[in-house]
Image (cartoon, helix red, strand yellow):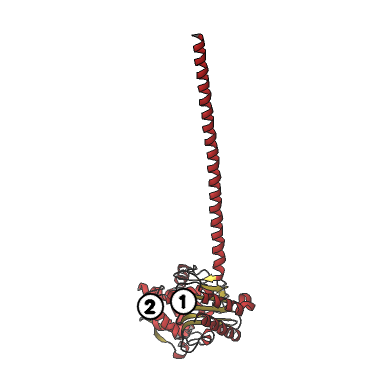
């Protein structure tokens, strides 16, 4: 009996040892598995962080050299081989001028365009009238401004510089005529009347609404003693023009009316000279020595928007813009 009891005790002891060993093995396995899980999670997090940083850097690099707009200023689509050729050719033309020249080209088929110094802020000269035109369209769309209503222009309100009202004299003009004269003749008197009616604050709110970070109306036309200037950029001007071309700025009928104003632009020097005869160009120019700008919608087989801003003086700027316009048209068509 004593021998059997002793044997049973030995068996119980061995069983306990086996159980302890198994438990130890299980615990060790769990510890190892936990360590591996932490390591894998850390690697995954690092990979995600690296991917996010890579995408962010790529986005920043892209925004400086490429440009494509739908309803805003963010790049969209792919750049066509033809557009890539246009970009290379234009870069060669403007390289020597540094920040004295800015260019934005945007195809209207949803593919990617490009800009050179596109966000560089320039004194706007009469290119600020594109922003005023945008707010005019918004108020007509909203029904708060009737384009057929009249605004009386007094002799005291007539200012110098470019314009048609200087020739026609004081009197009653419809708001539609004032908007047309502002674009067609770059009429400063008509522009000032529209600024008063639309409201400078509303005009600048339109710039914010369209995400035009470098465009701001600070003074009326010919108020040269105010020591402030109006500003814009090539990308901002292109945004307005693209929204007109795509019927996004207002209703299609209103955008068609705005295009009609731009098509009647009387200043045909600069970008127009680089286009073949018969190609319609709905555009707006701006001049305030040494500032010389031009930008518009090219109604080619493959329509696009092109904007060139310069501070080179009129003669040099017109020659440069002719070359840029020709290079872009040839590459795209």
Query: Is residue 234 rendered to the left or right of residue 259?
Result: right
Viewer-closest of 293 and 77? 77
In the image as oriented, which residue stretches furthest toward the top?
1
Instruction: Indicate whether 164 appears above or below 68.
Output: below
Whether residue 92 is visible? yes
The residue carrying pointer 1 sits among few (fewer than 14), some (14 to 19) or many (20 or more) residues within 10 Å by Cα, namely many
Distance, label 2 to label 1, CA atoms, is: 13 Å
The residue carrying pointer 2 sits among few (fewer than 14), some (14 to 19) or many (20 or more) residues within 10 Å by Cα, namely some
Circles 2 and 1, Cβ within 8 Å, touching? The answer is no
The picture places residue 302, in percent across and down from the top left corner, at: 46, 79
In the image as oriented, which residue stretches furthest toward the bottom?
167
Q: Which mark is residue 257?
A: none
Tag 2 residue = 254
Query: Residue, x 42% and y 81% (percent of image)?
Result: 259
The picture places residue 75, in percent across and down from the top left corner, at: 50, 68
In front: label 2 or label 1:
1
Instruction: Indicate whether 151 appears above or below 213.
Output: below
- The total number of labels drawn is 2
Q: Give SS at disc 1.
A: helix
The picture places residue 309, in percent across and down from the top left corner, at: 56, 78
The first of marks 2 and 1 along the sequence is: 1
Viewer-closest of 330 and 273? 330
The picture places residue 165, in percent across and down from the top left corner, at: 45, 87
Q: Give SS at disc 2.
A: helix
Query: Residue, x 54% and y 63% (percent of image)?
Result: 59
Q: Which mark is residue 241?
A: 1
Viewer-closest of 20 and 213? 20
In the image as oriented, which residue stretches furthest toward the right?
96
Query: Is residue 145 rendered to the left or right of residue 241?
Result: left
Whether residue 218 is visible? no
């Amino acid at each position: 009996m004593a021998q059997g009891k002793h044997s049973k005790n030995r068996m119980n002891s061995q069983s306990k040892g086996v159980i302890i060993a198994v438990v130890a093995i299980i615990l060790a396995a769990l510890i190892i598995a936990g360590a591996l899980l932490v390591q894998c999670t850390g690697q995954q997090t690092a990979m995600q962080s690296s991917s996010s940083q890579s995408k962010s850097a790529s986005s920043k690099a892209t925004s400086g050299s490429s440009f494509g707009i739908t309803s805003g200023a963010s790049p969209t689509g792919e750049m066509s081989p033809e557009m890539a050729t246009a970009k290379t050719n234009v870069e060669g033309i403007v390289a020597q001028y540094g920040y004295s020249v800015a260019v934005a080209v945007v195809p209207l088929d949803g593919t990617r365009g490009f800009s050179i110094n596109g966000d560089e802020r320039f004194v706007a000269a009469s290119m600020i009238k594109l922003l005023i035109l945008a707010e005019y369209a918004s108020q007509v769309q909203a029904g708060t401004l009737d384009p057929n209503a009249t605004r009386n222009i007094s002799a005291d309100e007539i200012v110098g510089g470019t314009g048609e009202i200087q020739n026609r004299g004081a009197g009653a003009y419809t708001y539609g005529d004032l908007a047309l004269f502002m674009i067609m003749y770059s009429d400063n008197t008509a522009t000032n009347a529209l600024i008063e009616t639309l409201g400078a604050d509303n005009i600048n709110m339109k710039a914010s609404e369209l995400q035009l970070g470098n465009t701001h109306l600070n003074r009326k036309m010919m108020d040269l003693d105010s020591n402030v200037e109006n500003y814009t950029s090539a990308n901002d001007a292109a945004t307005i023009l693209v929204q007109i071309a795509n019927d996004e700025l207002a209703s299609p009928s209103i955008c068609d009316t705005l295009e009609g104003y731009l098509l009647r632009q009387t200043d045909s020097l600069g970008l127009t000279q680089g286009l073949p005869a018969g190609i319609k160009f709905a555009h707006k120019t701006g001049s305030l020595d040494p500032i010389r700008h031009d930008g518009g919608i090219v109604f080619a087989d493959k329509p696009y928007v092109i904007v060139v801003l310069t501070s080179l003086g009129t003669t040099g700027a017109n020659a440069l813009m002719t070359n840029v316009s020709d290079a872009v048209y040839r590459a795209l068509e």
